[in-house]
Amino acid sequence: MMTIVFDAKDAIVGRLGTVVAKSLLKGNNVIVINSEEAVISGSRKDIVEKIHTRRSRGGSSRKGPRIPMLSDRLLKRMIRGMLPWDRTRGQEAYKRLRCYVGTGAGKVKESELKSAINLGHKIPAKFTRIKEIIKEFKAP
């Protein structure tokens, strides 16, 4: 098992998620840094509306749909959707995933940061970053 570091800055969440999920299923440990800088394609209004309707579907804090409101946890939850969660190997793969805001100050080795993989996707015309979505929900 080797540790692979991905830089989520300017990476499209769906494409980043598939690469990360595949790497996790191969048995690698994966660290994702700069998770707040990841990009979701589509207009901000549509994305926020979709998340808001999922959150307001009802249920209590124990039962209802749980949508994290921290950028690193939201990205981790999106990647979880690309893993076979109903099987043991998917749950074990999820345990090998670490997501950090920024560079993971003190939690990621300096040598691993230098070898971080940036997928370098072309940013679409309409996009929003995960940190902007989080701000939208935290603002009163």
Image: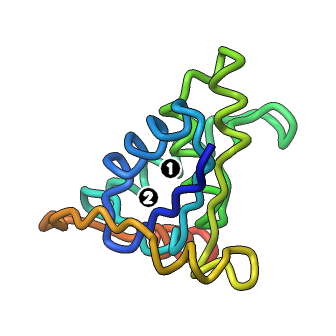
As drawn, is 49 to the left or to the right of 104? Answer: left
Which amino acid type is marked by label 2? Val
Q: Quadrant of residue 93?
A: top right
44 on left or right of 121: right
What label sits on residue 76 in the rendered view?
none
Point 33% across, 64% down: residue: 11
> Residue at 66% across / 57% down in the picture?
98
Q: What is the C-alpha distance between the residues marked 2 and 1?
A: 5 Å
Q: Secondary structure at mark 1?
A: helix
Q: Secondary structure at mark 2?
A: helix
Position of residue 76 measured from the top left corner of the image (x, y, whole percent): 60, 51
Residue ID for mark 2: 48
Packing grade of label 2 (10 A; few <14, some 14-19, many >=20) is: some
Amino acid on which disc 1 is placed: Ile
The residue carrying mark 1 is 51
Q: Are marks 2 and 1 in contact (CB under 8 Å)?
A: yes
